[in-house]
Amino acid sequence: MSHVGYCCLMALDRDHVLRSAATLLTRKSTATMDEVAKAAGISRATLHRHFAGRDALVRALEALGIAECEAALDTARVDEGPAGEAVHRLVRAIEPAAGLLAFLYTENQLFEGEQQNQGWARMDERLTALFRRGQETGEFRIDLTPAWLTEALYGLLASGAWAVSEGRVAANDFTYMIVELLLGGARRTTP
Amino acid sequence: MSHVGYCCLMALDRDHVLRSAATLLTRKSTATMDEVAKAAGISRATLHRHFAGRDALVRALEALGIAECEAALDTARVDEGPAGEAVHRLVRAIEPAAGLLAFLYTENQLFEGEQQNQGWARMDERLTALFRRGQETGEFRIDLTPAWLTEALYGLLASGAWAVSEGRVAANDFTYMIVELLLGGARRTTP
DNA sequence: CCACTGTGAGACAAGAATGTCTCACGTGGG
DNA sequence: CCCACGTGAGACATTCTTGTCTCACAGTGG
């Protein structure tokens, strides 16, 4: 009875499919199921066996993205230490998922249905809490609302992912560029 | 001979159609030609008389967005005065077009063909020149590349437009939030 | 050797969106 | 009044995507 073995193989395949789908859809969000299947190196039939339809695939990508972001929030320990350093750790931890996040961020179809993944609300809550904590400790300015800082972080992560994928920014500078701009801004601090 | 009069009416209609299409597509980028027509208050046939097809419509929106952004660059006189104030004037001038810009920014289909509108290159050039000028005058820090600042500006404009359209940020705070974050960052400057 | 499972390839129908066409209606000018 | 023009409504074929199905093939374990 090799049922367990087959399950593990399927799980691996499923994850691999999800990864390549994320990579492809980040670059071309209108890719066909056929293109997604070919990008994953499987046939469209097998793709349909893993994900009931395109909607299920996007939902799975959404769940994956949320899981990775929440994992990044955990490993970055955003509740500890100075908020600025917490943001730095967070961006560094979330960098591998930035491309997927950028895709999901522009898939506004995800947010128009009545049943939308509550993971986004959890993430928003944790991020706004981080920025609010920074404000309360006097580390962050209070004239930029936590909600806007959260939104700006999403936008900068997406911009950074696209800029890197198109070669306009070096991949090594991803975290630095985002964190420095988000925290310090473009203006030079008077010495 | 009312040819001239009809032309002017058509031009007005065309602009009106373009505006409503921009509003709709910014919110739902996969809207049908039928939905676009209904949103503009015309029939699908008339929409097709104005724009040969969906591609032509998107291209027209692209041209409109580029024109508005370049107009904003002109009225903001980004070559004059301190670079920081120039950025402020620019964001204020570009605010009405931010939604359209956000739509075009995520329509990566526009950038994969071989013949892509060279207006983007012109805009990029003028924006990077602005940030480079700020660096050369010592106003901006030099460790954030002009290319990244340009990309970040696009991203923040898009994030701001979405945040406003979904009520997470007050419309009145649009310019302030973007400019302050882009130039000053979230970190509080030590008094 | 045989049964079972997962896979790839392809056929197929259903649906949606697009692009094109025709026709009737209303309006405004000659 | 009449005519030209733009328009709306609808029909129509076409194309693309999707979802489902069947069948043959390969690998694995008993």
Image (spheres, coloured by chain):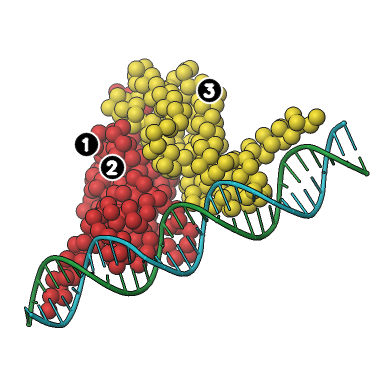
Chain colours: A red, B yellow, C cyan, D green
Q: Nearer the viewer, residue A70 or B117?
A: B117
Give the residue at x 31% y 27%: B145
Q: Chain of mark 2?
A: A
Q: What is the distance, in whole Å, between disc 2 and disc 1 at their CAs?
A: 20 Å
From the image, state whether disc 2 or disc 1 is nearer to you.
Answer: 1
Location of the C terminus of chain B (image quadrant) = top left
- Residue at numbered disc 2: A84
Position above or below: A55 against D21: above
Q: Quadrant of residue B14?
A: top right
Return the residue at label 3.
B74
Viewer can see residue B79: yes
Q: Position of residue B185 (x, y in %)?
A: 36, 35
Image vertical order of residue A188 relative to residue B37, above or below: above
Pick the front one: B26 or B60: B60
Looking at the rendered structure, the secondary structure element under dot 1 is: helix
- At horizontal 61% and vertical 45% (from top left) the residue drawn is B48
Q: Can you tell which quarter of the image residue A143 is in?
A: top left
Q: How packed is label 2: few (under 14 Cα within 10 Å), some, or many (20 or more)? A: many
